[in-house]
Amino acid sequence: MLFQITWFVLWGVLWAVYFMLDGFVLGVGILENFLGRNDAEKRVMINTIGPVWDGNEVWLVTAGGATFAAFPTTYALMFSYLYTPLLLLLFALIIRGVSFEFRGKMQGGGWKKMWDAAILVGSLVPALLFGVAFGNIFSGLPMDAAGYHGSLLYLLNPYGVLTGVLFVLLFVEHGALYLSVKTAGELKLRAIGVAKGIWPALLTVAALFLAMTGFATNLYGNFFAVPALFAVPLAAVAALACTRLFTARGRMLKAFAASCFTIVLVVGTGVAGLFPNLIPSSLDPAYSLTIYNSSSSEYTLKIMTAVALIFVPVVIAYKIWVYRVFRGPVTIEDVETDEHAY
């Protein structure tokens, strides 16, 4: 039981770290077509994420791998029940990665516009689908002994769509704050303006999400059973407020850090409410996939824990080194003089 709980916590941490890191990349991808007024500014935006975006994807692979190894039944049924949306998500992520590399291969305006559109699609679709997927996991899927009884359209229910919109707004805010730290001049000022403009909409949708969660899910059951857990969503609200406060004061690095905490705590709220479920059944709780009925053997979990204790710190140290090396802002002069720039 100890190792099952441990890997449930690690599962939640991996998803939270992934959304924190790739969230600003998705946000920058969404904003690239709207914030960049010319090709040079768009290149600056892409180069702010160029050295780190593929490394951030490692956390998605790790989260998926952890699900496969620690909770194989959940992995198998999730990829069976949600095959179509997960395939669309995969295609969108592939399109985004290809777009970053192919955009600068030719200088024609039509060529770059095509890949700019692909960057938008490859960033917006994953952000939305991740939110829709987690919204439906929070509320539960219609599954029983006969299998899954939903469809792609079923997933587009009001709560799922609301969660998708929340994720999109979170990532756009996150991306704008990242650009406010990593760019300079007019582009930086416009990024700050977007961060300020998006925040009221984000606050409104977040409030609706918290209210609707009480009606559409059973997440708050754990919080009422253990009131101390309410510290997690309250901390998320405080972090979101700090995002706006620091932005107003021009302390953009602190605002970005507050945004990081907001995303981690939002995911933490959902994971804390799910426990011990991984995918609840909306038809009958007896058919829910939990950490107990879908986990690997204790021996497997022990080996995974030992491997994680060795290699996760290595990955974290490497990520810290990469972000330290590329910590400075990117300017138009940088992309015009560096032959390795996107």
Image: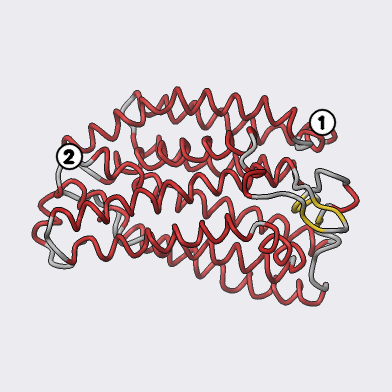
Between 78 and 192, the residue placed more toward the observer is 78
Amino acid type, mark 1: Phe
Q: Position of residue 66 (x, y in %)?
A: 65, 66
Relative to 221, is 102 on the left or the right? left
Q: Are marks 2 and 1 in contact (CB under 8 Å)?
A: no
Q: Residue at x 28, y 35 (%)?
A: 191
Going 55% across and 61% down the picture, which residue do you hit? Answer: 87
Question: Gap between marks 2 and 1, in whole Å?
Answer: 49 Å
**Left or right of 110, for residue 156:** right
Q: Quadrant of residue 56?
A: bottom left
Q: Of the residues shown, which amino acid type is indicated by label 2?
A: Arg
Residue 311 image point, x, y percent? 56, 73
Q: Quarter of the image holding residue 326? A: bottom left
Q: Residue furthest right?
A: 286
Query: Label 2: how many residues lie within 10 Å, few (<14), some (14-19) or many (20+)?
Result: few
- Which residue is rendered at x = 79% and y = 62% of the image? 4
Toward the viewer: 207 or 327?
A: 207
Quarter of the figure with the C terminus = bottom left
What kind of element bears circle 2?
loop
Q: Is residue 120 left or right of residue 14?
A: left
Label 1 sits on a secondary structure element that is helix
According to the picture, the residue beneath numbered tag 1 turns out to be 224
Q: Which of the two labelled residues, at mark 2 and mark 1, occupies the earlier sequence position?
A: 2
**Residue 133 at x, y percent in the picture:** 62, 48
Q: Please give the name of the residue rendered at 62% of the width and 44% of the height, measured from the top-left corner.
A: 153
Residue that carries the numbered disc 2 in the rendered image: 37
Quarter placement of the N terminus: bottom right
